[in-house]
Amino acid sequence: MASSSQVANKRGITLWPLIAATYFMASGGPYGLEEAVSSAGYAGAILLILITPLIWSLPTGLMIAELASAIPAEGGYYVWVRRAMGPFWGFQEAWLSLASSIFDLAIYPTLFVAYLGRIVPGADQGWHGIALGALVILVCLIWNLAGGRAVGEGSLGMLILMIGPFAVLITTAFLHWGKIGGAVNPQPITHSGLIAGLLVCMWNYMGYDNAATVAGEVENPQRTYPVGIILTMLLVAIDYATPVFAMSRTGIGPQQWGTGSWASLGGMLGGSGLRIALVVGGMVSSFGQFNALLMSYSRLPLAMAEDGLLPRIFVRVQKRTGAPYVAIIACAVLYAACLGFGFDRLVTLDVLLWGASLVLEFLALIFLRFRQPQLPRPFRVPGGIPGAVLVSALPTTLLIVAGLHAGEERIAGMSVWLFGILVIGGGVLAYAVSRATARFRFAPAVR
């Protein structure tokens, strides 16, 4: 085995594998949009699906394109924030990202098993469900040890497998234009319904920055990242809007939608064959998301260890693939330990914790414009410093709206705000402990 410095120049992930991996980091397909339709109706959901990427994803994509092409370092957003604002804020960026990942990633193996339970009754019950979830994590762990290129190329294959059933669903839906249940009664678009649908869409459109943590393994990152991020966003928006629009013309009312309803609705249109195909697509989506995100998050301990913020053992990588095997194993064990919690996908908490880290990334964009104006930027957010501020303001405003809505949510018997404050406070405490116990001095902020 080797340290990361011995493979610092290793490349391997090309454009389309990067697009596929980013797709699973940020999307995973239309699975998860069902609640947007049930909350906001067809018209409201389609409106949100089309508008959210313009004011949420596009500004994020522009920020990522500039910073990832200017600073294509392993560790991605952690490195950007540390370089712009110092080691304390860099640590908080990584802490928030890893903390939110615990609540996010542990659910994907559970979803995989839940979908499997629709084909094999009882597979998701009791210890069987936990064992199968652990098996999913183990397979992803082995896959990740093969390196970033293997994960990217595997994601490309899974993307094709997952899109197939939806292509059939869309075709079948148009063939059944208005034939099921008669005409759809338009669901009134309410303020609460739009806010609830917005949170779902924000959750389904977030995560593009996760692709930046593997920049050290991407071929020609200065060109590949800007092109890859923009193409992924277009693919995701089309992938979301088309099946929802097609289903809106079938006569199936929005009140028939709910979590996991793609398979049952597909069965209404195309029979058991399409239902099973959509269930399998859900399994592929859950597996692909966990696999790609494990690759992304495992690079954070690697970068932090290189800066002296974590034990040096996390810098160890495989000579042949460049995979940080210690970090991958540690992250996989952490996520596996949460399998038995049985918590639902905490959309609001995910958005808020991840959103806090996103705000730090936008601040890094602005700070670096002031502090390092001569930094080579193959891609620049247009408009100079005012343009960077404007791009940062749009997603931040959405996060404030989401935060105000979250005031009514409760997690583990406490308000989501109190829970979030405890998580953030844990990051401050962890940094103090890390500094107190560090065996090495911090590396220079400029990489």
Image (spheres, grey):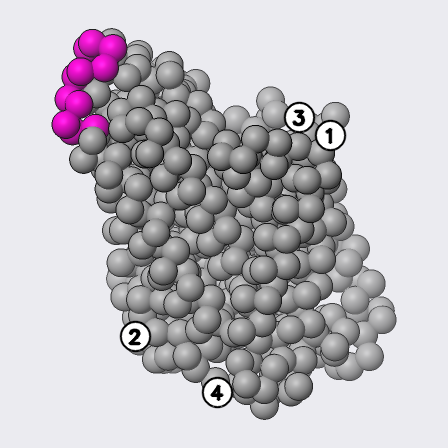
Residue 168 higher or lower than 258, as above or below: below
Report crowding for label 1: few under 14, some 14 to 19, many 20 or more residues within 10 A (C-alpha).
Answer: few
Q: Name the amino acid, label 1.
A: Ala
Pointer 2 and pointer 1: residues touching (CB < 8 Å)?
Answer: no
The answer to which of marks 1 and 4 sits earlier in the sequence is 4
Residue 85, numbered circle: none
Question: In the image, what residue type sits under mark 4?
Answer: Asn
Tell which circle, 3 or 4, labels the residue nearer the N-terminal end. 4
Residue linked to disc 4:
9
Q: Which stretch is magenta?
A: 173-184
Tell me how far mark 3 sits from mark 4, CA to CA. Answer: 46 Å
Q: Is residue 98 left or right of residue 377?
A: right
Q: Mark 2 = which residue?
A: 223
Quadrant that contains the N terminus: bottom right
Marks 1/3: CA–CA distance:
7 Å
What is the distance, in whole Å, between disc 1 and disc 4 at their CAs?
A: 45 Å
Q: CA distance from mark 2 to mark 3?
A: 43 Å
SS state under label 2: helix
